[in-house]
Image (cartoon, helix red, strand yellow):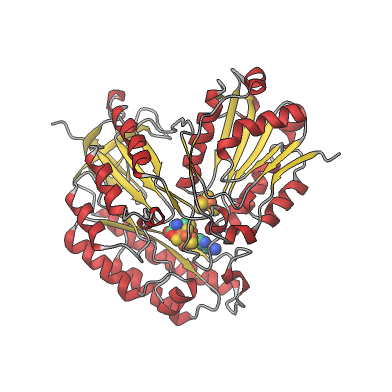
């Protein structure tokens, strides 16, 4: 008899296909065996990767708290440990192997501990096979579309006394009414789309997250209204490409529409991530400019400053399109803060093409940029391209780009000093609990001395010192 229940195994062939989606309004019940075994006990979730994974953690935490479990940060106290994984680059994936490996000792000492590996790494056929082989003590492997089944999978694990694998690649449904336990008390992520249909040639996300699908406006607005009513100060609308919101609903619903409707709910701060430069239209710019509660901070991934490379990446815009968009945004909102993602060393990138990227970075002058060395992801078209650029060359280019980005970040950070900004106070500073920390409208972190009653409020702070990636300030008493 097999010791593993294989409900679903991932398949890249299936993951490449796009399926119709149905909105599933769930009625979740806690299986009695889960209550009996786990009620009153602790869970720990370690999340890697992007906002989509963070929001998934909140759903998993919501489900576990339905079973009367509580969160802990201490591995030794936990009865359920979930590693929520990211596969976007080799380095991210390697980290996961280390994390899961570290749990072996705990599992040996505590046979009742349930170890679950979830997220994007599990969605890859080869990685899952390797994880299963290397870490036979993992109890449940659970895909990105199986989150709503968490309690049932735990119940299966206990009643059948078998390992469980549930990683579908062909499920494009939208699951509503999954309970949520938010990580932050003042700031919340709200999914507007799941998956991605862009298929940039280097990227694994369309395979690990499946078809691009939009939640219904009413469901998004309901979630946002609850947040507003419970005093949340900031909402970030999340999607791999938020601009594509509504396309699959085929009824004319657009991202501009949902952005405006959420802005109208009166949340003090509204953000969105990520917007693709390709279909960032004028209506979106109008809405951002019209509502002061939509933060003037946009993450606009460039990826490369070479038209040839952009074409090979399948990004569907040219450098000219990108720069025109930047010009338009800055013409309408001179104070807008722009950040970006850039990949160096895409297969066969020439020195000239790399220099073109530097040129665009110089022109745009980003507030901050996330830079990556291209990492081949098995199953993506780019991974099949022959590559004549050496690792050393890629490293050198990366360092040059990083130096340019750092100098821009430093110079832009220096401009804050002496000025006053509105800060949403998040909590205590990680390093010093006598100090508060919060975020500017441009999403920069500021530390300042203040009383705990300010936590969760928006206050004015004068920046006195730049530490480049953070600021020190003084509360302005009004
Ligand atoms: N949906 C978002 C990005 C998700 S991945 C978007 O389109 O902007 C986050 C970033 O990781 C990407 O913007 C890209 O710069 C980087 N990235 C993705 N795949 C990569 C790869 N194979 N190698 C290196 N960087 C990669
Ligand atoms: Fe990946 Fe491109 Fe989709 Fe972003 S838009 S998630 S980079 S495929
Ligand atoms: Fe990583 Fe998956 Fe997000 S691969 S970046 S966690 S969608």
Q: Residue at x 34, y 51 (%)?
A: 468
Q: Is residue 403 above or below residue 415?
A: below
In the depicted view, which residue is nearer to us: 385 or 64? Answer: 64
* Quarter of the image that includes the N terminus: top right
Q: Residue at x 46, y 30 (%)?
A: 181
How many numbered dots are placed on residues in this image? 0
Q: Is residue 68 above or below residue 322?
A: above
Residue 414: x %, y % from top left: 27, 54
Residue 363: x %, y % from top left: 29, 71
Residue 174: x %, y % from top left: 48, 44
Left or right of 422, for residue 23: right
Residue 134: x %, y % from top left: 76, 47
Left or right of 78, for residue 340: left
Q: Residue at x 69, y 37 (%)?
A: 103
* Quarter of the image that includes the C terminus: top left
Residue 107 seen anywhere in this rendered image of the structure: yes
Left or right of 150, for residue 281: left
Q: Is residue 189 above or below residue 231?
A: below
In the depicted view, which residue is nearer to us: 76 or 214? Answer: 214
């Amino acid at each position: 008899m097999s010791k593993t229940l294989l409900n679903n195994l991932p398949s890249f062939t299936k993951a490449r296909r796009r399926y119709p989606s149905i909105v599933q309004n769930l009625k979740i019940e806690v299986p009695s065996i889960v209550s009996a075994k786990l009620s009153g006990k602790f869970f720990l979730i370690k999340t890697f990767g992007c906002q989509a994974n963070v929001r998934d953690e909140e759903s998993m935490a919501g489900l576990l708290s339905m079973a009367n479990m509580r969160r802990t940060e201490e591995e030794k106290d936990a009865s359920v440990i979930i590693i929520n994984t990211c596969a976007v680059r080799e380095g991210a994936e390697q980290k996961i192997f280390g994390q899961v490996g570290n749990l072996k000792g705990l599992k040996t000492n505590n046979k009742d501990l349930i170890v679950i590996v979830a997220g994007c790494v599990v969605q890859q056929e080869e990685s899952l096979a390797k994880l299963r082989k290397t870490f036979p003590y993992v109890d449940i492997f659970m895909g990105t579309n199986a989150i709503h089944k968490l309690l049932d999978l735990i119940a299966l694990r206990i009643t059948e006394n078998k390992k469980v694998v549930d990683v579908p690649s062909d499920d494009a449904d939208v699951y509503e009414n999954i309970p949520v336990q938010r990580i932050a008390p003042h700031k919340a992520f709200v999914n507007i789309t799941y998956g991605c249909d862009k298929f940039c040639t280097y990227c694994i996300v369309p395979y690990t997250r499946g078809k691009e699908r939009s939640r219904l406006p009413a469901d998004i607005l309901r979630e946002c209204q609850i947040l507003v009513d419970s005093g949340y100060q900031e909402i970030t609308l999340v999607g791999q490409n938020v601009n594509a919101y509504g396309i699959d609903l085929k009824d004319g619903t657009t991202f501009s529409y949902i952005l405006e409707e959420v802005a109208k709910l009166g949340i003090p701060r509204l953000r969105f991530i990520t917007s693709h430069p390709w279909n960032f239209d004028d209506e979106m710019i109008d809405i951002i400019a019209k509502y002061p509660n939509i933060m003037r901070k946009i993450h606009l991934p460039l990826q490369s400053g070479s038209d040839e490379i952009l074409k090979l990446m399948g990004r569907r815009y040219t450098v000219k399109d990108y720069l025109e968009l930047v010009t338009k945004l800055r013409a309408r909102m001179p104070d807008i803060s722009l950040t970006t993602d850039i990949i160096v060393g895409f297969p066969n990138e020439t020195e000239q093409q790399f220099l073109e990227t530097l040129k665009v970075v110089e022109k745009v002058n980003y507030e901050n940029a996330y830079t990556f060395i291209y990492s081949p992801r098995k199953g993506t078209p780019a991974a099949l391209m022959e590559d004549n650029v050496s690792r050393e060359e890629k490293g050198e280019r990366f360092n040059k780009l990083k130096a340019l980005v750092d100098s821009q970040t430093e110079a832009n950070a220096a401009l804050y000093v002496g000025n006053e900004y509105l800060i949403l106070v998040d909590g205590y500073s990680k390093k010093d609990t006598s100090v508060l920390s919060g975020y500017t409208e441009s999403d920069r972190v500021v530390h300042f001395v203040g009383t705990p009653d300010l936590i969760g409020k928006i206050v004015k702070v004068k920046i006195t010192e730049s530490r480049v990636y953070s600021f020190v300030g003084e509360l302005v008493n009004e």
